[in-house]
Amino acid sequence: MPQTTSFDPSDWPGVQRVECAISDFGAIPRGKIVDLASFSAQLGCRLSSALWGVTLSGDVAADVLGPIVPADFSDMLLRADLNTLRPRAGRPHELSAICEPHGPLVTRTGGHSIDANELSPRAALRRVLRQLEASGFRATVAPELEFFLLHPAPGQQPPWSAARPAPHMRAQERACESNSLERLAHFEAFFDAIYAGCADLGIPITGHDHEAAFSQFEINFAPGEPLAQADAVSRFKSLVKTVAARQGFIASFHPKPFADEPGTGMHWHLSLQHLGEHDWPHAFASPDGRDRDALHHFAAGLQHHAQAAMAIFSPHDASYQRIQRPDASATRASFGSEARDLAFRVPDSGPTARRIENRLPGGDSNPYLVLATTLAAGLWGMRTSASVTLDPKRCLALPTDLLSACKALQHNTVLREALGDTLVDAYCGILRAENQSRTAHNKGTHDWDAMHLLEGA
């Protein structure tokens, strides 16, 4: 898509304000709402860079704020990608713009200087997409995103239950009602608002259902270009939480809200196409339906880097409870066809739709970093002609805790190069600080999860 570089307020009659949003490491939208004149002057806004050094629990990450990000709360410019301007959902007098941070950030310790863009998950994905293009390919991706609709229930364990569709309604799920159309009908007002908001924001959703866990639902997205799809998922998560809050319950991407139920997934279907003029552009399959070598090399790259990638795919301690149920999520970097207990699978599909599904990312992960990591690992596999491992018992075991995954990521040269040293070090610094906060919480780790992941994931 051609990049729009100018903004004319007259193109948006009646608009008074613009929401300037960036995604932090945890995929939480941060930013500011400014009046139209202020936005027009800067094509964005200014915001403190300290947000990169603060954890989900509001603590300062000592390895980040000071050593990497200035501790003096220096400003950075949030520059809008004008192609992402959309009406805010349900707010016709306001626009929403997805931004990226820019500007020099100088720490007092040794005068170390970085550009704020080095910390941006969205910018990291754009860099990987340029590498993909330089290799002669483009990607098409489609996410499936799960979430839970919950209501706080203080005093019980876990401290939440299934949401009621409205405060005055007595209907409430008591046990998992997988694929229930009746339960979907109870939440029609909620989903109607979601579809309307997605239409405003240009989010390409195609359907929804009740998933295979208690009070869990799933939204499907149409295939599209990776950056636009990551933007869509980022906006969707915020939209779902906002609509649920307005209707009296909580939409949660907590990775594992119920110990005996499957967790929250963010599965990505991915295919590659050759750039330029090709009689057959599809890189993963031949016209006769046979898998091409590129598919197996790409999958081998995912397998090879899976241990390090888990720090991106599973960014919280509670995320690792997802992979302790092999019936619901893979415990090894396995690859094959159809079976949903694999980490990376090839769904049954014709040659024009041949794709790999990455089933490891959780709903609490950052979509920009997930796609950047997935593409970087797969591209490495294609460049090196890596060999795929088909025997599940011979596949690498996935890390079972957050700190092990962080250590693997910090020592992985391929992913460090793809995401950037600054981003990896700051990202892992935040995750370590959150792990320390959770461990030190005087009411226990589950209480920390309830306090910070129920609405923050």
Image (cartoon, rainbow, N blue to C red):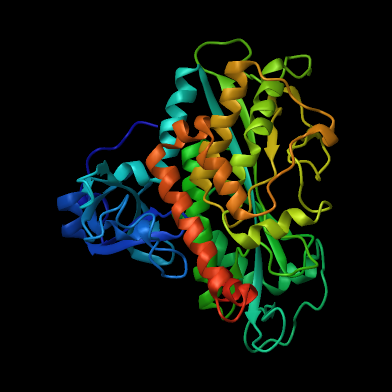
Q: Nearer the viewer, residue 99 or 435?
A: 435
* Quarter of the figure that contains the C terminus: bottom right
Let me know if residue 239 appears in the view: no
434 in relation to 70, above or below? below
In the rendered image, residue 407, in percent from the top left (x then y), is placed at: 56, 45
In the rendered image, residue 125, in percent from the top left (x then y), is placed at: 45, 37
421 in relation to 403, above or below? above
115 in relation to 319, above or below? above
- Residue at the spot 54% in from the left edge and 30% down from the top edge: 376
Left or right of 364? Residue 335 is right
Q: Image quarter for residue 179?
A: bottom right
Q: Image quarter for residue 34?
A: bottom left
Let me know if residue 408 appears in the view: yes
- Residue at the spot 59% in from the left edge and 40% down from the top edge: 308
Left or right of 64? Residue 445 is right
* Quarter of the figure that contains the N terminus: top left
Q: Nearer the viewer, residue 181 or 263?
A: 263
Q: Nearer the viewer, residue 145 or 352?
A: 145
Q: Nearer the viewer, residue 74 or 133?
A: 74
In the rendered image, residue 74, in percent from the top left (x then y), is placed at: 21, 57
- Residue at the spot 41% in from the left edge and 70% down from the top edge: 58
The outermost residue toward the front is 110
| Number of numbered labels in the structure image | 0
In the rendered image, residue 144, in percent from the top left (x then y), is placed at: 65, 49
